[in-house]
Image (spheres, rainbow, N blue to C red):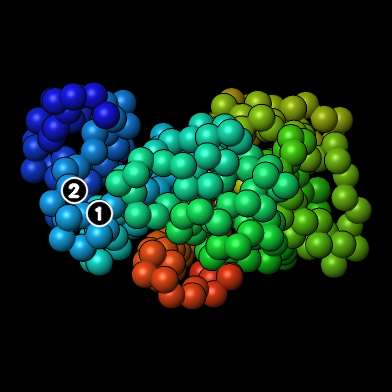
Amino acid sequence: MRAGIGLREVAERAGVSMRTVSNVVRGTGRFSEATQVRVLRAVEELGYRPNTAARRLRTGRSGVLLLAVPELTMPYFAELAGHLLREAAEHGCILLVEATGGDPEVELEIALGRTDPLVDGVILSPLALDDRAAARAGATAPVVLLGERVHDLPCPHVTIDNTGAARAATAHLLARGRRRIAVIGRQTVPHAATSATRLAGYRQALEQAGLRYDEELAPPVAAYHRADGAAATRLLLDLPEPPDAVFCFADALAQGALHAARERGLTVPDDLAVVGFDDVEEARYTAPPLTTVAPDKQELARLAVSALLDRIGGRTAPPVLPAGHRLVVRDSS
């Protein structure tokens, strides 16, 4: 942390009041998602850390938790961070938020507990954590993982049934009479757990319907941003036999797909049905509103904070903590 960085400096950088900064950091009060993103970005850029020395002297713990996610600019992680901030505050804790950029070395350092010594424990959403290296995670500090259960790690793992959710989303499109269903979100890089589990569910649904998996309908993407979704959709629409539906592994990808469909003069869902994943707030306001898989973000936050506090307190937490999800059907399909 740079000397002299406090609430005032964060407030000036984010263009909000000091009270708003305090509310966002502590997860209390009311603030918009856009405000939350601005404040968290300012916190990260300035390296702000609350003063917790007095609390540590009294209790032996700082009451500071760390959330590490790939990107704060992605709406899903911004919304999840909001739920976690509020849940941590319910337990009298402060939650710091850090963006890893999906860097496997950064994720490993955090998974091994090599963070600010004031941090009592870590909630980590890994993107590229190496399997073998990650086997050491959680051994030196309390760590809880968010996301797909693909690592056999000695720490609690909070997740949803990604394979089942993807299977249900694809089955929904099949039930609507779609037969040439493309998928956007396949990744070829190592340790792409989100891609692997959701692709498995997509393939299972096709197989149950007697349809063959066609890799031509699963173009690889580098990331889960809107631009990636739009680029992949353009490739699909250029095929000799384009798809009649696309299932996207993130709502941002689906928003890109909607944009590319409009570029080509297509009508959604008549010409192309679109389904996303995450149920971010923007999904309700796309044109048309987006059908999407909705993970229970509030339950994810509750389970993650509870499991981390158990670990910090020396109590045992279950190795896997499943949260719920549901398919929200809107006009895009």
Work out whether 237 lies above or below 155.
above
Q: Is residue 310 visible?
A: yes
Residue 102, image x and y in percent? 56, 35
**Which amino acid type corresponds to the residue marked 1 in the rendered image?**
Ser
The residue under the point 34% across, 49% down is: 119
Secondary element type, mark 1: loop
Question: Residue 329: percent from the left, percent from the top?
Answer: 53, 61
Quadrant (top left/top right/bottom left/bottom right) for the N terminus: top left
Towards the viewer: 228 or 275? 228
* Disc 1 to disc 2, C-alpha distance: 6 Å
Q: Residue at x 20, y 63 (%)?
A: 59
Quick check: 49 left or right of 206? left
Q: How many marks?
A: 2
Instruction: Residue 52: give its label.
Output: 2
Query: Residue 3 versus residue 269: which sits nearer the camera?
Result: 3
Name which residue type carries label 2: Thr
Tags 1 and 2 in contact by the CB under 8 Å rule?
Answer: yes
Q: Tell me the residue that label 1 is attached to.
A: 62
Identified at 24% across, 33% down, the residue is 48
Q: Residue at x 86, y 30 (%)?
A: 240
Task: Judge whether residue 333 can be spotted in this image.
Answer: no
Q: Is residue 206 above or below residue 244?
A: below
The spot of residue 156 in percent (x, y) is: 54, 65
Q: Earlier in the sequence, mark 1 or mark 2?
A: 2
Residue 291: which quarter of the image?
Answer: bottom right
Q: Residues within 10 Å of mark 1 (few under 14, many from 20)?
A: many
Left or right of 52, for residue 309: right
In this image, 264 relative to 226: left or right?
A: right
Task: Kindly identify which numbered label has been placed on residue 260.
Answer: none
